[in-house]
Image (tube, rainbow, N blue to C red):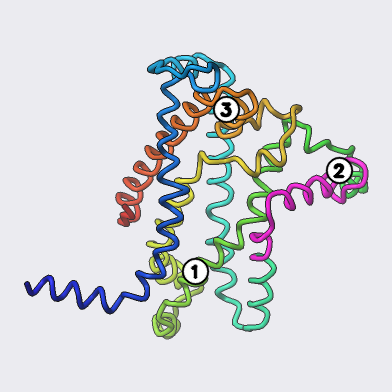
Amino acid sequence: MESISISKKHFKRQKAILILMIPGLIWYIFFKYLPMIGVLSAFTNYGLKMNVSFVGLNNFQKLFSSPVFWNAFKNTLVISILNLLFYFPLPIILALCMNEIFHKKIKEIIQFIVYIPHFFSWVVVGSLFVTLLAPDVGIVNRMIQFFGGESIYFMVSPRWFRGVLITSNIWRDVGYGTVIYIATMATIDRQLYEAAVVDGASYFAKMWYITLPSLKSTIATVLLLTVSRILLLFEQIIVMYNPAVYSVSEVLNTYSYTEGLQNGNIAYGSAVSLFTAVISGILVLGCNFISKKVLDESIL
């Protein structure tokens, strides 16, 4: 009885917050959980015949025997790993540098400059990079020509296109990650830094022994969220790629979209999406295990 009364007391105390959660919960139920019923179509021939029937694992057998699928899987892993390697450390480094700026106005201006691209849609970002990298009038190729080089067709070059994807992703989202780490740094007790200065600690000593340990839980959380989205590449690719670079940019979600919606084979596209979701779940669990071992932080 006492525990029930305590629970009621806590509920009354958090009543306003719980009410605010209701719209978000409803949205997740209708747009995230209920659509999962569509996973069952991966085990049927839906989209190819009028009479839908159960076909078991036929779609997955077709999937695993398709060279196009394995190429999309390889591209997804390569692009995702490159994004993780080049993007993930940058917000931490940028936040550490900005944390040393004591002039409040300058700090706010820099935060605004690096954060504002996050609000641009991928359609805007894609158009911007197409313009900047245009072979004739793009500022990047003009600079290359100025220094004696030849124009590079970045957007149709299999050699350069992945670099364009990584660079555009960094430019758009690095500010968002930076703000998360700066917000965490704002909660660190300044007396720790003052005591370190008295003890003669250098900038790198303060960063290593105070700042980074304080960011450990945030780093673990951001890493897990990043890994959870690692195979979900879609909007950026669908906006920026073209037939000339399909061999290095076709990923699992664009392959699922092409097969399911454009070619009408919805069951096969659902099988691709289900495979992607399962692999994403395995990666999240693996990331959480590594985070627990290395950073001593478990998120799940």
How far apart in space, not on screen, are marks 1 and 3 (Cα)? 52 Å
In the image, which residues are magenta?
115-140
Q: Residue at x 64, y 52 (%)?
A: 170
Closest to the observer, 57 or 138: 57
Image spot of residue 208 (x, y percent): 43, 66
Q: Specify which label sits upstream in the sequence, 3 or 2.
A: 2
Q: Is residue 220 magenta?
A: no
How many badges with numbers are in the image?
3
Give the labeled residue for mark 3.
Answer: 260
Query: Residue 153, image x and y in percent?
Result: 83, 36
Q: Amino acid at mark 2?
A: Ala
Of the pair 49 and 127, the residue shown nearer to us: 49
Can you say whether 199 is above or below 58 in the image? below
- Three-letter amino acid code of the residue under disc 3: Gly
Answer yes or no: do the residues labelled 1 and 3 have beta carbons within 8 Å?
no
Q: Which residue is mark 2?
A: 134
Q: Are marks 3 and 2 in contact (CB under 8 Å)?
A: no
Task: State the residue at coordinates (8%, 74%).
Answer: 2
The mark that comes first in sequence, 1 or 2, is 2
What residue is shown with label 1? 204
In the displayed structure image, the side of residue 247 where residue 16 appears, left or right: left
Q: Secondary structure at mark 3?
A: helix
Name the residue: 66% across, 39% down: 237
Label 2 near label 1: C-beta < 8 Å? Answer: no
* Element under disc 1: helix
Question: Label 3: few (<14), some or many (≥20) within 10 Å?
Answer: many
Position of 34 relative to 108 (above/below): above
